Amino acid sequence: MSTAGERLYDLSLIEEMAGGDEDFMKEMAETFVSSVPPVVESMLHFSKTHEWLKMADAAHSLKSNIDTLQILCIKEEIRMIERNGKAFVDLDITPDLVVKVVNVLNLAMDQIKIQYKL
């Protein structure tokens, strides 16, 4: 995954959009840390209750966050979760993928909170 202290995300795409506007950057960080946790919890719940299509929908809604923040260590996993849930394949490994994605997103949110003093 990553070594201690290594950032799990890369804000260069958002920095490019912000054009140096630090308020915009902080607003994007706040949006991420407030909007992602409910989706993460839903995805985890749906994985545990075997509601595969709902889990896939939750994974789909997280893809843009993961891509925009360039959280590369879970880029493939989030796509696999979505695919597996929609196609009802590899469901034996999917809960472990969900746990990995949830853990990485939680760590990334913690890092962002520290960076932006949220």
Image (cartoon, rainbow, N blue to C red):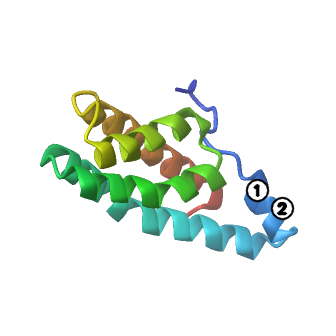
Examine the rendered structure and indicate whether residue 68 appears above or below residue 93: below
**Which residue type carries mark 2?**
Glu
The answer to which image quadrant residue 117 occupies is bottom right
For this orientation, the residue located farthest to the left is 49
Q: Are there few (<14), some (14-19), or many (20+) residues within 10 Å of tag 1? A: few
Q: Are there few (<14), some (14-19), or many (20+) residues within 10 Å of tag 2? A: few
User: From this viewpoint, is residue 102 visible?
Assistant: no
Label 2 with label 1: CB-CB less than 8 Å: yes
Please tell me which residue lies in front, 96 or 3.
96
Where residue 6 appears, as percent x and y from the top left, is 63, 32
Q: Residue at x 40, y 52 (%)?
A: 59
Q: How far apart are marks 2 and 1 (CA)?
A: 5 Å
For this orientation, the residue located farthest to the right is 19
**Which residue type carries mark 1?**
Leu
Secondary element at tag 1: helix
- Which label sits on residue 16? 2
